[in-house]
Image (cartoon, rainbow, N blue to C red):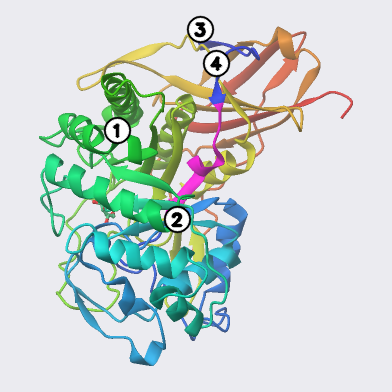
Amino acid sequence: MSKTAKITLHPELEIGEIDVRVYGSFVEHLGRCIYEGIYEPGHPTADSEGFRGDVLELVRKLQVPIVRFPGGNFVSAYNWEDGVGPVEKRPRRLEIAWRAIETNQFGLNEFMSWCAKAGTQPMYTVNLGTRGIDAARNVIEYCNHPEGAYWSDLRKSHGVAEPYKIKTWCLGNEMDGPWQMGHKTATEYGRLANETAKVMRQVDPDIELVVCGSSNSRMDTYPEWNATVLDNTYEHVDFISIHDYYGRYAKNIETFLAQSVDMDRYIKTIIATCDYVKAKKRSRKTVNISFDEWNVIFHYRKSRPPQIEPWGIAQARSEAMYSVVDAVVFGSLIITLLKHADRVKMACQALLVNVIGLIVTQPGGACWRQTIYYPFLHASVYGRGRALSLNIKSPTYEDDEFGTVPFVDGVAVANEEEETITIFAINRSLEDDIILDGNATDYSDYFVCEHSILANDDISAGNTAANPDNVIPKSNGNAHLEGGKLIATLPKVSWNVIRLGKKGQ
Ligand code: AHR
């Protein structure tokens, strides 16, 4: 007999309004993400500013609302001034975080221009590793102050007449990590972040600020780091940033498929920590989560990556080829973010291009979409509106690390304006297709517009330069809705998008 997962689709099972910035991404001066990724003067599709047109086209399709820059670990030893002004005068520097040479051909103004072309907003990170308050107040004046003082006038002299008015700023990157240049204790960092926040708000009171929480939930300092940092910064920040990359430590494929259980626990702990500090401070304000680095990582890497010689320029690093199973885990992470739509208000998939990227490029050549590009595309395009819990009752399996894990996970998004409902669902089972049996009586006047599936007989299949469309989603699902009952088959190891529209529209 087929396995069945029961769901309830009801407008009142609301989780929260989705902030579209949960579909953000990240570009860092790391490997070939910027150079040969988004920026490659001389590429056949490059525009007059050196931005790859083929990559821009794929990025625009994703409708990415916000992109974090310039790091990452990179930012913690970065002098932002090196990346502005006449390109020929910019210094080459030893880039300490990744032990590379940074040519500074691409900097702040190039990033802002690329954002405009990509149709996205910037999330800018200041260096609180080797630098601090002074550099932060200068860069915010350069970006956001109209004119009449040194840094804003310098921006004007660089050809940017109007201030950028960058709204979202990160106070450093992963400051809990011993690998971070200028790593600090929670108290040292919390004090510095608070004072930096105050100074930045003096320059521009309209900004929103993101403070560094944990780099992952396995850190020795987790979760105390988050409580201490918030204790020092609560009234001056709006978001706490958390990061994690999932799959690296999975012992087997079942555990790999269950990674979102870990993400879910992590988010719940950070929400609890934010609210603990809120109560402690008797504050009326709520700090939300910016999960501004997340991805699936290296499940199928069989061998060690090639040794990278130090002090090279844009050498390939962490260029994973993603598979079908990676896309399913990736989809489960998106579902988890949406299941916390009330508190996870921003998130950045990391990274956009080449470095564990959604998109892969060849220097001077083609670019193509990885398998994980598709769940991101679906969620960003169709996942706008109110997140609804599906109240799932799924068959389960036992996992050594995560205990009882449901085979099926999912979430729905109601877009009232367009009168559509979209269900995102995964099936983790390696053996069985599972029937989704939905009570949708409140949507009996809706019909199934599309049931798109990403799956493959070979779950390790991926896309390559030679075969860029080897794994793509297909609208071949059998979902149907009749008399308030939604029935669909979720194939084994699959990512599913079931789109419902109102009859007569
Ligand atoms: O993969 C990117 C790196 O991972 C970022 O630079 C850092 O923030 C994280 O540790």
Q: Viewer-nearest of labels 1 and 4? A: 4
Residue visible at 31% across and 27% down?
Answer: 274
Q: How packed is label 1: few (under 14 Cα within 10 Å), some, or many (20 or more)?
A: many
Residue pushed farthest front?
A: 148
| Nearest the eye: 489 or 448 | 448
Judge whether residue 360 is colored magenta: no
Q: Viewer-nearest of labels 3 and 2? A: 2
Chain part drawn in magenta: 17-26
Which structural element holds mark 3? loop
Q: Viewer-nearest of labels 3 and 1? A: 1
| Nearest the eye: 137 or 2 | 137
Circle 3: residue type = Met
Whether the residue under disc 3 has CB within 8 Å of ligand 1:
no
The relative height of residue 1 versus residue 72 in the rendered view (above or below) is: above
In the image, which disc is placed on residue 1? 3
Residue visible at 50% across and 73% down?
Answer: 147
Residue pushed farthest bottom?
A: 88
Q: CA distance from mark 3 to mark 2?
A: 63 Å
Q: Relative to residue 151, is residue 160 drawn left or right?
A: right
Pointer 1: what residue? Answer: 256
Q: How packed is label 4: few (under 14 Cα within 10 Å), some, or many (20 or more)?
A: many
In the image, which disc is placed on residue 204? 2
Circle 4: residue type = Leu
Sooner in the amino-acid sequence: mark 2 or mark 4: 2
Sooner in the amino-acid sequence: mark 1 or mark 4: 1
Query: Is there a contact, CB below 8 Å, between mark 1 and mark 2?
Result: no
- The C terminus: image quadrant: top right
User: Where residue 197 sits: x, y (%)?
Assistant: 32, 49
Q: Viewer-nearest of labels 2 and 4? A: 2
Sooner in the amino-acid sequence: mark 3 or mark 2: 3
Q: Viewer-nearest of labels 4 and 3? A: 4
